[in-house]
Image (spheres, rainbow, N blue to C red):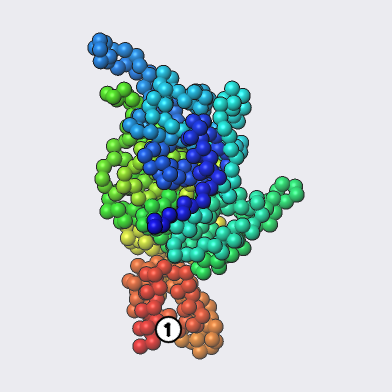
Amino acid sequence: MTTQVKRPTLSRLESFIDAMIELGQTGQVFGEHGIGKTATFFTHIARAHPDTALVYVPAANLTPDDLLVNAPVRDTHTGELVLRQLVMSQLKPGRPFVLLIDDSLQAGETIQSQLMQIACNWTLGEHDLRALGCVGVFLTDNESLSETAARRGDLALLDRMVTMRINANDTSWREHLTAKYRPWDLRPVFSVWASLPPPVRELLSPRTLDHVLANAREGFPLRWGLPLVDGARLRLAEPGPDGRPGRNRTAEILDRIAEALGVPNPSSVPDPVRQVVRAALRNRWTVLLQGPPGCGKTELVRQTLREGLGREALYFSLPVTNVEDLCAPIPTADGTLDNLLAAKFTGPEPKAIVWDEYNRPKDRAAFAKLMEVTQEWSLAGRPIEHLRAQIAVQNPPYHLGRKLQVARNNIAQATRFTASLEVAPEDIPANEWLLARYGSDAETVLEWWKHDIDDEGRAWITKRTLERLIKLHRKGLPLQMATVYLGDGEYAPVPLTALVDRLNNRPVTGLRELARDVDTWEARLRRAAAASEEGANDTDVVHQILANAELSQLRKHRAVVTRLVAWLPPKLRATYLVGADPKQQRFWTEVFMAMRR
């Protein structure tokens, strides 16, 4: 007797897909972002219709000549050049296919006209899609006007389609996440999600929940899975009676998810930028890094990718990137319209992409193309081979009270990223690079930056500005010119007198000075320790110098550090290990062991 394998229960969307294919009707699917609409088409067509191809067309990044174009071709019978309408090569896959037009409401007016012909008649120009092998046509999108470019209201078009509105319960996202995150038992997580009010569940969409789980698996803060919308972290808050967001429940909800998984939810991790870029290479992630200008984000990302790939990453600066820099449609000999990818996207080598100045695109068309790349890892429907990671880098909308000229995004665009980090200058280890490149001059400038100015001053003096200060000092030029010029003769409000004093070798105290007179300082610390368990002013001076020193400086003066740290109160010594990266922790552990011996 043959055992019959029980077919899994189909979701509402999967049943709809099968019915529309069987009936030969155009299907229109509306639903919130991030609930698995597009993913359901990919998985269900492959499983339920294995002999049928899925032709995926992201409408948001289409240009008028992508689907159909008039081009001169040579007639095979007469040998003359004639004008023919060529369709995109994807519409001739050579076997039965289902056409999925995703984000259909986000296309421009010209594209909407082309989509109307496809939806109504299953034709495009002079081409009959059925003759090309089409067995199903579907249009999907979110109806929210905050995410779309149009509202479909033409009755002639609407009368040709079968339309279904769905929510998160109409797709199989739970089964997908269960399979993806084995051996975790996600049932407690799903219970947490189901217990949330509907507006909060919409914010914490299945796609966003997927990203939260991905960060939890890497030991990262779970909040990194929440998108940055218009520069601000998404807040999980239920709207109040007046429509404004109510109590922010983000921390509470994420802690509940961490507890359901049995994992920590750290507030931070050491060296976050390098850690998340390495995770992106391991897991094939798309990552967004947002931080103030001049802090060294892009250089650190490119260096980390270079180390992980063994070659340079593909680099695009969005303010100067055209659509044609990525791909362009051209006529082919077989009478179709094919998209040529830029040469750097081809080849068998491992690849990673850096999208620099991500929220400063040259035009909307180029930015629209990125939506396909970041979500589907393809361009014009063609997968980018051996692409292992994508890192987008951008500035916040506001910095130091000033508005930056950056574009806005919506939540559908923001949720394309597995991890979204808000990067602070202290997260970028650019100080070591300055020390390696500029030696004692960098040491002097960094000591001024750490000890002589306040937090606001440090925010104005970026790592890029520090390098300019060093260069101008070496040329004997006025240092003020290295700071940010604000217009009308005004420069960044940061006093430079103490820096001039340091550069002119006037009396100051830093790690170099401690090393030069280590016997005197050890005696001072011994007296302070004898007078009080808390130490004294000299204790605070040495502690602050050691806490702010870079690892290369500490290693250079290891013997001095070991002698002095032995006289510091234990509670101060313990702070050197808290939140430090593994290399710093290893250094201090070795120092403490040597101190005991």
Q: Compared with residue 496, is residue 491 higher up or lower down, i.e. above or below? A: above
Image x and y of residue 564, in percent: 41, 80
Do we see residue 258 in this rendering? yes
For the view shown, which residue lies furthest in the right direction? 241
Mark 1 is surrounded, within 10 Å at the Cα level, by few (under 14), some (14 to 19) or many (20 or more) other residues, namely: some
Q: Compared with residue 324, is residue 78 higher up or lower down, i.e. above or below? A: above
Residue ID at (38%, 33%): 96
Do we see residue 489 in this rendering? no
Near-viewer residue (336 or 245)? 336
Q: Which residue is mark 1?
A: 566
Residue ID at (59%, 26%): 159
SS at mark 1? loop
For the view shown, which residue lies furthest in the front direction? 1
Q: Compared with residue 548, is residue 428 higher up or lower down, i.e. above or below? A: above
- Circle 1: residue type: Ala
Left or right side of 366 for 388: left
Image x and y of residue 132, in percent: 38, 27
Left or right side of 110 for 581: left
Q: Quadrant of residue 595?
A: bottom left
Q: Quadrant of residue 316?
A: top left
Image x and y of residue 555, in percent: 34, 72
Q: Quadrant of residue 380?
A: top left
Near-viewer residue (426 or 350)? 350
Residue ID at (31%, 12%): 82
Near-viewer residue (278 or 164)? 164
The N terminus: image quadrant: bottom left
Residue ID at (35%, 88%): 597
Image x and y of residue 506, in percent: 43, 65
